[in-house]
Image: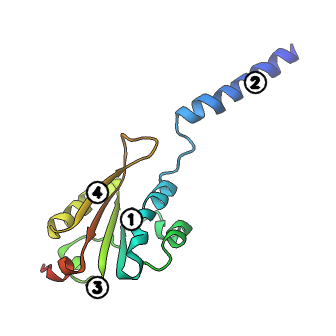
Amino acid sequence: MLLIFVLFIGYQNVNFYFYEYRDGHYFEDPTNELTYETGALIAPLHTNGRFYLIAEPSVPFLSFANFNFFSPDVEKAYFNEVTPQTLAALPKDKDALFIATAARQTDIELLARLLPGGEWSEVRRRNQPDQVLFYSLKVKKSDLQAFKP
């Protein structure tokens, strides 16, 4: 009887780990995925650009080590209050890359309307392509300088 109980518990654990756990994507953390996937967009800025993150205020994304590891020489800052006035107050001496989490889609769409010359992209989750991971808007220095609120 004890052997049957042990085999039953073992089967349940193996079934959960190799099937339900994997199929349910329990191991995937969107925050880590975001910091990893944005690296390819942020790193080319080097010292010629700035990276602005538009994200939920309760999540300290910029403190994640991936941002500094993949792009140590890029200036990084939050840009959570998206208005024409806050956009006008940004420094305009470098190109800018704005990245917004999926929850902040309306904010980055507002930026795209205010800065029409920017390069827009939508990145989906790697293992769950039905979900958006983040939106990005890359803006040249000249477009920032031309913006008037």
Residue 105 is drawn in which quadrant?
A: bottom left
Tell me the residue that label 3 is attached to: 91
Numbered label tally: 4
In space, the residues marked 2 and 4 are separated at their CA atoms by 47 Å
Residue 61 vs 28, above or below: the answer is: below
> Which label belongs to residue 9?
2
The answer to the question of whether label 4 and label 1 lie on touching residues, with beta carbons closer than 8 A, is yes
Q: Are marks 2 and 1 in contact (CB under 8 Å)?
A: no
Q: Nearer the viewer, residue 50 or 106?
A: 50
Residue 71's spot in the image, x, y percent? 48, 73
Q: How far is the residue under mark 3 from the one under mark 1?
A: 20 Å
Which image quarter is the N terminus in? top right
Marks 4 and 1, the one that precedes in the sequence: 1
Q: Earlier in the sequence, mark 4 or mark 3?
A: 3
Q: Which mark is residue 70?
A: none
Rendered position, 98 above or below 125: below
- What amino acid type is highlighted by mark number 2? Ile
Circle number at residue 121: 4
Question: Which callout, 2 or 1, points at the residue further toward the start of the chain?
Answer: 2
Which residue is pictured at 25% across the width and 60% down the height?
A: 120
Question: Residue at left 15%, top 79%?
Answer: 147
Q: Position of residue 85 (x, y in %)?
A: 19, 79
Q: Earlier in the sequence, mark 2 or mark 4?
A: 2
**Residue 11 locus on image (x, y percent):** 72, 22
Label 4 vs label 3, nearer the camera: 4
The residue at which mark 1 appears reads as 41
